[in-house]
Image (cartoon, coloured by chain):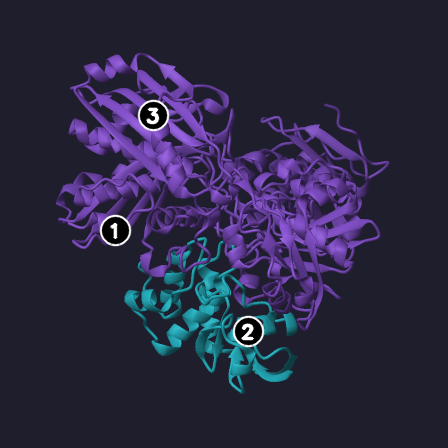
Chain colours: A cyan, B purple
Amino acid sequence: MAFKLKVNGKAMSADVDPDTPLLWTLRDTLGIVGPKYGCGVGQCGACTVHIDGQPVRSCLLPVSAVGQAAITTIEGIGADPVGRKVQAAWTELDVAQCGYCQPGQILAATALLKAKAKPTDADIDAAMTNICRCATYIRIRAAIKLASGQPQTA
Amino acid sequence: MAVEPTGASRRDLIKITASAAGLLLAFRVAPKAEAAERAGAVALNAYVRVGPDGIVTITSKNPEIGQGIKTALPMIIAEELDVAWENVRIQQADNDPKAYGRQLAGGSSSIPGNWDDLRRVGAVARAMLVQAAALAWNCPPGECATDAGYVIHAATGRRQGYGPLSVQCAAIAAPDPRTVALKDPKAYRIVGRGTPQYDTARIVTGAPLFGIDIRLPGMLYATFQKAPVYGARVAKADLDAAMKVKGVRKAFVMDTDAVGKLAGVQAISDLGWAAPLNGVAVVGDSWWAARKGRDRLNTQWMEHPTGKQGTEAYDARALSLSAGPPQKLLKSEGDVEAALKGAAKTVEAAYAYPFLSHAPLEPQNTTAHFHDGKLEIWSPTQTPEMGAQLCAKVLGIKPEDITLHMTRAGGGFGRRLQNDYMVQAAWIAREAGVPVKLLWTREDDMAFDYYRPAGFHFFKGGVDSAGAVVAWQNHFVTFGDGEKAAGSAAMGANEFPARFVPNYRLGQSMQPLGAPTGPMRAPGSNAIAFAVQSFIDELADAAGADPLAFRLKLLGDAGTVGEGNDAYNAARMRGVLELVRDKSGWANRGKLPKGTGMGVAFHYSHKGYFAEVVKASVGKDGAVKVDKVWVAGDVGRQIVNPLGAVNQVQGAALDGISQARFLKITLKDGQAVQRNFQDYPLMRMADSAPVEVHFNMTDYPPTGLGEPALPPVIPALCNAIFAACGKRIRRLPIEEPLLRA
């Protein structure tokens, strides 16, 4: 059945089964491939998107549960001033290695900074639960500090 | 070797043995002109195209898997070409070994294997542009210089951009790469400067880059169900039930033996336990539909001899093998028995480490389109040439009928040296007749890995009253059949401390394994360093010595011992050991609070010398916290991209800590017990630690950085835990409950 979705500020329609996870609706039906598949069980966070500004693992969220909520993906996060700042910090420090997890990391970091403008290391540890298999955690932490205007400790 | 002059035909193939390493540098003068994306661009060789506006497109030959090679290799060419980096565009090469030689992401080999050749590629193109200017200006080329994309003639003040000059290069013969002048490294402006990855802007905006992102018109999506027991074949599957799921287009059984007969090869025996084509393929309009179809298959599998294997039995068998004499003596020097008898102190210890899964975050996938007898592939692979050959063999087509595009890979770690998923996709695409994207689930990826093999080391060692190691015996129990070790389960006869201990014996026993194994980041080394460098620590403790000073003494005052691939440069190792001692504040470790300790270890692999110190704390409850890591590395005289180099080393160190603390694959009833990240818990942010990186610059050729920083961190951590709480880690992963006070 057709679901009307609001993705990155645009109205879109996807004709999929109701149990289809939002991740696959975005990737395979709507062609929005920034959110990545890593585990399918909500563990790794590579599929993270924002639903009304909250970070959500889209691999577990059936498209039928989204309703009229605003979906923001990595493709749209640059329209948000905080998101843009996070992307800039990621670029300046050249955080990525393979880069596969980074869309999810950037969305998680953006949500953290919107909730707390100057997060502590403990805040970062608690909020940044996404897996980076290349283990770029040192630069992810530094980039969050940079984006929040704090000195980089590591 | 002769260099054919060009001029008459710009498409002549130039082949020369150019580098000191004797590698074949082969490049066509202009095979890609028609592929030039930028209007009017002129190809000076297979790597370099110059646009009329001076924008230079450089081809990167090797697969990008997160090691940063897509940026680093073009930096080397751009340096010698002498072009401004902001005017460089990078294009990923297709698989084309005739044009590019070996295209591989493995063994940390891209920098050492291409450093010399690619400098010459850039220098040859630069020389042609200089020649073109000299002809136009009617002056000797020797009077011309270049400056970031321009040829200049100082005497007359003339200056011309590469863009206009490139048009005149059609008539210019490429000079001999063997003798072309190379830059003085002191003049480098690109190499040695921290340079962000070329794809960074696309990564942070989510642009399509990876294999999983490929979308083709009319493309269908596939999933492939394999037997949970390695090598087992399908007995029956309810294909009709799968076909009833909305969106499922096709479901069919694949079988290695049948495929083997069809392809005219014998049971594809070289594919081994992975038996990549035994299973059931489900193809649908979406991947989700295909997966739902797969869930309905109710597949029954034939019995298979590997169905009873398990880690527990392997551990028990290893222990019983250790009680007997080694099946094979790999090296024996001096008289170990006598030396142990005469030693002031002796130590005996057994070490073990588990199977590991590579778990690159992008699950295995490949998109393939088979049409008109030809195959086009888009794949995240570390070995494109081998992948194309495998597909050609199994599908019974010619390698030249395969076009293989290398996509960026979401991690590799050695997993994508194997192309089992690629050949599955090729087979499914041929059956489907339309473009198909095959994507594995994470569970597939963990269940059907080529695991890092588990292994066992049974040590005896002795030190004399002066604190010197006088005896070393290692009975290495590993996996294999007859004379042949399982993939990445062998140990070199000269592995350290061979040649540094007068009475030395390395014996080996093997037991057969019914699961696929293969190289994982720093293969062999990632496990052996843990065992060897931990046991050295035990000997240091028995001698009552400072573990770092003890290691310096063990290295002695030797320079290079051995030759060729067996060469070990003790001076370079002492250099990094002394550097990490000084940078980590090793001398002050006595002032650390109770429950905190520092440990050290070193290891040589992939031509890189690395010594590392870990500071860690152990709580009363056994909880481990890694406080900091110091790394000192020696990879020669030049770091190509310091920004990427530090990232690689930090990632390798944290990857090692992640393995040591959290990860294992257990086999039970013939299958991997661990299915996904909830039971294979890769490190997350909260367990990461600062990693301080130092390079000891020495006058040796530049070598690679993807791997050699990993092995020492594991024993350094275990040795730090011993320093912190007095408990020795002899089995990985670290079990914190065993560390309780």
Label 3, secondary structure: give it.
strand
Furthest-bottom residue in view? A68
Do dots 2 and 1 share one subunit? no
Foreground of the two, B158 or B498: B498
Q: Residue B251: x percent and y percent?
A: 70, 61
Name the quadrant containing residue B142.
top right
* Chain to which mark 2 belongs: A
Label 1, secondary structure: give it.
helix
Q: Residue A130: x percent and y percent?
A: 42, 64
Residue pointed to by mark 2:
A21
Q: Residue B197: x percent and y percent?
A: 53, 54
* Amino acid beneath label 2: Pro
* Amino acid beneath label 1: Glu
Q: Residue B98: x percent and y percent?
A: 73, 37
Q: Which circle marks residue B49 in the picture?
A: none
Residue pointed to by mark 3:
B474
Q: Is residue B396 above or below residue B349?
A: below
Foreground of the two, B333 or B322: B322
Q: Work out how far the residue at label 3 is from the one at label 1, CA to CA, in angstroms.
A: 27 Å
Q: Name the residue: 37% across, 62% down.
A: A141
